[in-house]
Image (cartoon, helix red, strand yellow):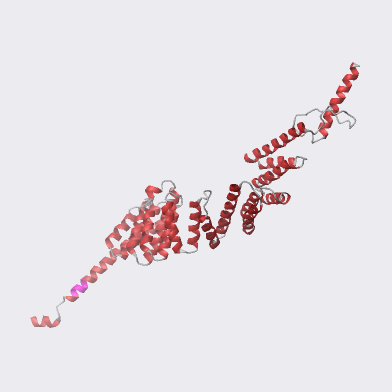
Amino acid sequence: MKFLFLSLSALVAFASVEAADTNPAVLAPNTNPVVVAPDIGMITSSNLIAPGTVANKAEIERYYQNQLDLAGRQRHEKFPAMAIQTLVTILQTNAPSEFKRSALFELALATQDNNDFVKAQQVFSQYLQRFPEDPRNPEILLRQGLLYRQMGVNTLAISKFYAVMSSALKLKLDNIDYYKNLVLQAQTEIADTYYSLAQFNESADFYIRLVKADSPSLNKSQIEFKLIRSLSFLTNNEETIARSQSFLEHYPDYPDLPEVRFILASADKAVGHNAEALKQVLLLLQSQQDNAKTNPETWAYWQRRAGNEIANQLYKEGDYMDALQIYQNLAGLDTAPSWQAPALYQVGLVYEQLQQWQKATDTYDQILARRTELTGTNAAPSLSSLCDMAQWRKDYIAWLQKARAADMGLQHSFLYKPSLTNVTALR
């Protein structure tokens, strides 16, 4: 009897393990086996808990949640291919529907992280088709729009951004603030997409709407900056001037402040406000030490561009005194010969136009004093040519002054030369 009892115990254990291994609803892979009584049919009593009851359901849910968490960690740790494999495994099982839904959403994100944008779009589309009333849908539409823009399909991107707004209105949602932010995000993306396509009328229209929107979630300074850019491309000078002046007043520490000042100076120059344009350029150039420390490369770029463009325009228009102020400030921005020598050369040309010959000569001498730096082996050929031009202009001024002195002498001698009649009378 003892031997028979052992045989039956072994048989029960074997049958229990076999039932667990062949029934995925009882035991998921990689979980600790839960040994239960075999299913012998309806003739048994109800003293034992049957497979697939509440206890096993909790184990199953815990397993799939762990798998979802694993896939999330793999994705955030930059292993999207591993996350895809984990998620596909979940989708291929008979996991509960809520886990499959989450796995499908995570699969789209992992595929996107794996730079497979076409497949990511397909997975997102499948999600929208299978779960048309899901609260995630506005977010999925937004993600699709961003992906389409990344793929260069801007028309589809814009249509998806518009769909975010319409879908958020249709759904009966509890978290209103979350969906308001999604709609605002979609509006900003529409504006940015139009801007990237150089459709500045449309981008300016959307940026104006966003500026008027009363939402603490909006980065108003950045939106107003993009609006000013859009208006400047449209050559809407009056509104560009008004908004740029307001921007300088309200956002004095904005990182791209020098570009705004450049845009303002250009707009002022375009409408003939030369004095205001000069003021903005000089403020930009003289901000080097106070404001340019945080972002020196940006400040240097816009200082040089604004100075050169406005000064060159003033020079061409014959406004030499204003051009001179800018060129002198430009020369003081950087002592490197590659920058300072060309600026000084422009100063010399202005002095020539003003007929201040000695100052022009002294300026060219400043360039020639650095001849070694300008003509060295590492110097650009253009600097060597600049040095030659400075020497030629200096020599030309010297020749011109001598020629004028000789001419003045001839005129003087002609005016005071005694006439032949007077000479005869004296005799």
| Direction from residue 155 to residue 291 in the image, left or right | left
Q: Residue furthest top?
A: 2
Residue 83 occupies quadrant: top right
Asked if one can make out residue 137 in the rendered structure from this viewpoint, the answer is yes
Furthest residue toward left:
427
Q: Residue, x 72% and y 34% (percent of image)?
A: 63
Q: Position of residue 315 (x, y in %)?
A: 37, 64
Q: Is residue 261 above or below residue 17?
A: below
| Residue 170 at x, y percent in the picture | 66, 53
Q: How many marks?
A: 0
Say which of 237 and 341 sits in front.
Answer: 237
Can you say which quadrant of the picture contains the N terminus? Answer: top right
Q: Work out which quarter of the rendered image holds the C terminus and state it.
A: bottom left
Note whether 385 is above or below 404 in the view shown: above
Dominant secondary structure of the residues highlighted in magenta in the image: helix
Q: From this view, report whether residue 65 is shown above or below residue 419.
A: above
Q: In this rendering, does residue 340 appear at all? A: no
Say which quarter of the image contains residue 85. Answer: top right
**Residue at 38% in and 58% down:** 386
In the shown orientation, is residue 351 left or right of residue 63?
left
- Camera-side residue of 241 and 187: 187
In the rendered view, does 322 fall on the left or right side of 153?
left
In-image side of 89 versus 379 (left or right)? right
Q: Nearer the viewer, residue 389 or 20?
A: 20
Which residue range is magenta in the image?
A: 409-413
- Residue 114: where, in percent of width, then height? 66, 45
- Is residue 241 depicted above or below 18 in this figure? below
Determine if the magenta segment contains residue 226. no
* Rendering coords of residue 276 (x, y %): 37, 61
